[in-house]
Image (cartoon, rainbow, N blue to C red):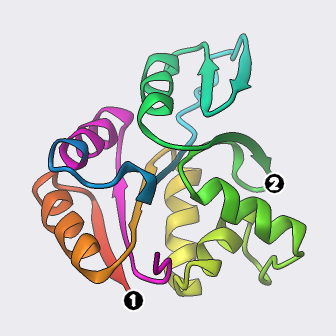
Amino acid sequence: MNKNNSIVAIYPSHTAAETAIKELQQSGFDMKRLSIVGRDYHTDEHVIGYYNVGDRMKVWGKTGAFWGGLWGLLFGSAFFWIPGLGPLLVAGPLVSWIVGALEGAIVVGGLSAVGAGLYSLGIPKDSIVRYETALKTGKFVLIAHGPMADTTHAKEILNRTEPETLEHHQ
């Protein structure tokens, strides 16, 4: 897998992100090549529980059904508390790249652990700063990666779902 070829889309809500993921799944996109990051925590929400069993994670709270549905589709899941970004839920291969960046102390100046994971995919630092800003404002960042043919196909599909931004990083 060429992890340096990625499509990154930003969605304003979990509903929009979920629609995009379902479109990719229905088109036959390999769900092992898809990651999502988001927080969608509101001050009136209190997470009651969290656990991870194998590749399945459960969260209770306002968006628990959204995240619970994604854990069945995407491979790997984690909850991170990242200074400057707060509580983030991450699903997909990005989890292992974040952990790898943390374990290898590959945190790039000014970037969070999520940013370091994206940087390890070959995503430019200026784009990462925009994605981190989107996360801070409660948006969702969806990443599809793989060979050029797969990411080009993913870009066509995601473009139809009307993301706020859609960028192809090679």
Point out which mark residue 170 bears.
1
99 vs 83, nearest the viewer = 99
Vertical placement of 47 versus 56: above or below?
above
Tell me: 167 left or right of 114.
left
Vertical placement of 136 versus 103: above or below?
above
Crowd rating for badge 1 (residues with CA inside 10 Å; few <14, some 14–19, many 20+): some
Q: Please say whether residue 34 is visible from this viewpoint.
A: no
147 vs 60, nearest the viewer = 147
Tell me: 25 left or right of 94.
left
Given the image, on which type of amino acid does mark 2 rest?
Pro
Q: Position of residue 144 (x, y in %)?
A: 38, 63
Circle nearer the N terminus (2, 1): 2
3D distance between C-alphas at marks 2 and 1: 29 Å
Point out which mark residue 48 bears.
none
Q: Residue 142 occupies which quadrant of the picture?
A: bottom left
Callout 2: SS = loop
Q: Tell me which residue sits at (15%, 59%) in the image.
A: 157
51 vs 149, nearest the viewer = 149
Q: Residue 145 occupies which quadrant of the picture?
A: bottom left
Tell me: 155 left or right of 30.
left
Q: Quadrant of the C terminus?
A: bottom left
Q: Nearer the viewer, mark 2 or mark 1?
A: 1
Given the image, on which type of amino acid does mark 1 rest?
Gln
Q: Position of residue 126 (x, y in %)?
A: 54, 85
Q: Which residue is mark 2?
A: 83
Q: Position of residue 136 (x, y in %)?
A: 59, 52
Region of the chain picked out in magenta, as a range:
1-24
Q: Tell me which residue sits at (53%, 87%) in the image.
A: 124
Q: Please say whether residue 102 is visible from this viewpoint.
A: yes
Crowd rating for badge 2 (residues with CA inside 10 Å; few <14, some 14–19, many 20+): few
